[in-house]
Image (cartoon, coloured by chain):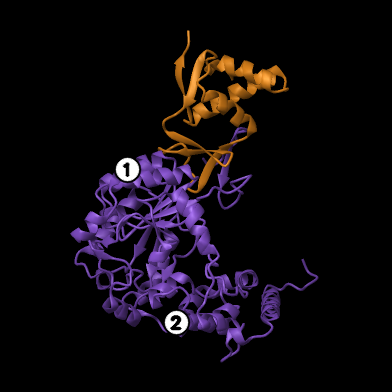
Amino acid sequence: MKGIRSPFVIRKTRQQHPLWRKRQPLLSQLDIELTERCNNNCIHCCINLPAANRSTRIRELDTTQWESILRQAADLGALTVRFTGGEPLLRKDFPDLYIIARKLGLKVLLFTNARLIDAKLAHLFIRIPPLERIEVTVFGLTRKSYETVTKVHGSFLEFQKGVRLLEENRIPFIIKGVYLPANADEVNQIEAWAAALPWMEHPPDFSLLMELRGRRDSPAKNRSLLKLRSSPETAVTFMRRHEKKNMPGMASFCERFVGIKGDILFSCGAGTGGCVDAYGRWQPCLSLRHPDLTYDLLKGSLEDALTRHFPTLKGMKAQNPDFLQRCARCFLRGLCEQCPAWSWSEHGNLDTPVEYLCQIAHAWAHHLGILAAGEKSWEIQDASQRIISWAKNRSSIQGNREGKSPGKK
Amino acid sequence: MKQDIDLKAIYVPSEDVVAREIEGELIIVPIVAGIGDGLDDLLTLNETGKAIWDQLIQKKQLSEIIELLKKQFKSAAEKIEQDVYGFVKELLKRGILKMQSPRS
């Protein structure tokens, strides 16, 4: 639709224009975790179950049940549905679910490892485009690195084949990575590949924090995940790799998003969307599986979940003394991943601070010059002033670098 | 402009799109390739377009729609005719509308 010159048809890009003149619909996007099963057995994964796990498979919603949920999402105004997993393409009825979603007028965002993309599926994506870029996770660029992560023999070749089909058929996709010892040396190559893809608008995202299992079902797996975590310093060094490019925006980011949020638990965007797990339970987000916060859609409806169940979460406040002493008084929450989902997977409750995240946020703030060595953010008395002075200082450094002076345009 | 459009015909939304009314906004979502290829883009109609669309989905003949709009709006009759022709032609070209049947 590029180059629309019609007096009647208006092309609206979500990022550029307010889509809704009056008010937002109740639901804008729904995340659907079609399965927890995966054809990879990744060392870092916080969700995957074996692909052939029969007891899991028979618990999953069937096509008709998913159709009902998709229809409800469309009726509530959702424009996009994200199919994720596990590996969503493991579902034999994936093409049916995809067509159902698209025919309901939903755009489809697919998260996949690309191993199961075959000619038939590629043809479907050509004929009925998803209208969102497919997101492919890349675990490595050599067989050795890739399969060290996935622990599945032959997975690299299948991944290559799937990606080739997308590329050859010009099906829009982007890539993202996971930063692990096995592929740490390939980050530059992955970024170079990404830069050559016409659909990438910015460098690929890399996961590096290694979330623990949200089901809290495997202490052994959690122990392995903990071993894979980078030190806070290494994590910050990794995040700094595009510093020159990103730093100009960092000052305004900090001014907007760094600040004290008090004892409110859900200061994230949870509540404007939501996620449905493979068995029909609505969750506030993909990671938060606390049984008291989920809602059984097989016994109710999406509308009920969003209008009656979810608003109660928004008002929830932290009780944990450690949270109240630290997180509630911390002004780095825009730099910190601390949230109820992380507390749940790490500690089994919603408000115990996650030490690792706290360390990363402090290392990051120290690197940026917001905090001095050894300072704790919750001990700073003049937090707002600290951020304002820091942002001004950054802008002035940036201005000097660009040869600007206050009076110079 | 008028020559391609049949006044006695009924024009309806194509099966290749889904028109969704969400919070008062009409959103046209392409289903098949070739209608809207902008990835993150959505198509909506302006007020004139929306007024014509509301009549089209009631499966009325084009001539009937023009007469209704003439009564509904204060604009000059010629302008309304031009708008309806322009709108139908534009949406036919984009594959958003199709001719259901000419009425004899």
Chain identifier for the orange-coloured part of the image: B
Q: Amino acid at mark 2?
A: Tyr
Marks 1/2: CA distance? 43 Å
Which residue in the protein does label 1 denote?
Answer: A124
Left or right: residue B62 compared with residue A352: right
Q: Is residue A110 visible?
A: no
Q: Residue furthest right?
A: A407
Element under disc 1: helix
**Residue topped by disc 2:** A356
Crowd tier of the residue under label 1, counting other residues whose Cα lies within 10 Å: few below 14, some 14–19, many 20 or above? some
The residue depicted at 42 percent of the width and 38 percent of the height is B31
Q: Nearer the viewer, residue A214 or B97?
A: A214
In the figure, B92 relative to A58: above or below?
above
In this view, the residue in front, A223 or A174, is A223
Image vertical order of residue B58 relative to residue A173, above or below: above
What's under tag 1, amino acid-wise? Answer: Leu
